[in-house]
Image: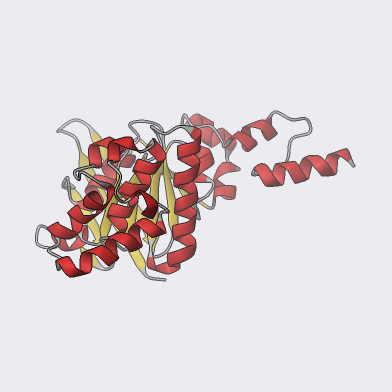
Amino acid sequence: MTQAIKINNLNYQYDDTQTLFNDFNLTIESGQWVALVGHNGSGKSTLAKLVLGLIAANAGEITVFGVPLTVETVHEIRGQIGMVFQNPDNQFVGATVADDVAFGLENQQLPSNDMPSRIDEALNIVGMQAFKDREPHTLSGGQKQRVALASVLALAPKIIILDEATAMLDPDGRDTVMQTLQALKARFGKALTLITITHDMDEATMADRVVVINDGQLILDGTPAAVFSQRDLMHDNGLALPFAGELAAQMQPAPANYLDERELIQWLSRLKK
């Protein structure tokens, strides 16, 4: 498989006394959906900033699709990565939804004749085409995040990083954004790598892979089932399991391994028989 991101022996210090990452290693394959989880201050967002070249590592190497991140290559690498942040209101610059999606294309100096089709395609992908002439402030939180996602998709990135993108949304808005990510995964397959930074373990279950970090150290890395079967280790690092996992752990008898909601229901139905 092609490596989308490779982090090798990364070292990063906030200052002369506080080290966050010390010889940190992580490889993300092209087409994977990786949920990066950890409690607040664990280093999740800092890692994203390092990959984007927004802050510089003290040592180590970051490569994106085989290109080492340097001062000379940072703009090339940023062109392959789209970022969606926590607060959608901070991301809007256009008077309408279409204007907002067009902003990034204008910065890339895309010919004006090519813009309408790119804008329409991106909005169609996230289900927001009907809102293209609406003012962004009239949208719900979930709709705003889908527009922010469309603005990123219009630029055709190979990697999209969502940094706590659902943290400020109500349950309905959160569900619509997560459903949109699932649709993106199905539509683009290996051509798009998703990285969702979150402390919501139920969201993390949707990913192909869960990476748990704490104070800049990699604690767990594997499938959701493998990671969430490590209940004690998750708790030791200040993290709960997804709802189904925590519920199952309180049952007598308890399942031997982590179960998602569907599996838990099936397990309970067998117990009744």
The percent coordinates of residue 79 (x first, y second) are 21, 61
Residue 238 appears left or right of 226: left
Is residue 29 among what the camera can see? yes
> Which residue is located at x 24 percent, y 37 percent?
90
Specify the color scheme: secondary structure
Residue 269 appears left or right of 141: right
* Quadrant in the picture for residue 140: top left
Outermost residue toward the right in this view: 273
The percent coordinates of residue 91 (x first, y second) are 24, 41
The percent coordinates of residue 209 (x first, y second) are 49, 53
* Quadrant in the picture for residue 213: top left
> Which residue is located at x 77 percent, y 43 percent?
267
Outermost residue toward the left in this view: 72
Residue 205 appears left or right of 259: left
Is residue 213 among what the camera can see? no
From the viewer's perspective, is residue 171 above or below residue 128?
above
From the viewer's perspective, is residue 237 above or below residue 262?
above
Quarter of the picture holding the N terminus = bottom left
Quarter of the picture holding the C terminus = top right
Front position in the image: 137 or 204: 137
Total count of labels: 0
> Which residue is located at x 32 percent, y 36 percent?
138
From the viewer's perspective, is residue 262 above or below residue 15?
below
> Which residue is located at x 35 percent, y 66 percent?
3
Front position in the image: 110 or 113: 113
The percent coordinates of residue 162 (x first, y second) are 35, 46
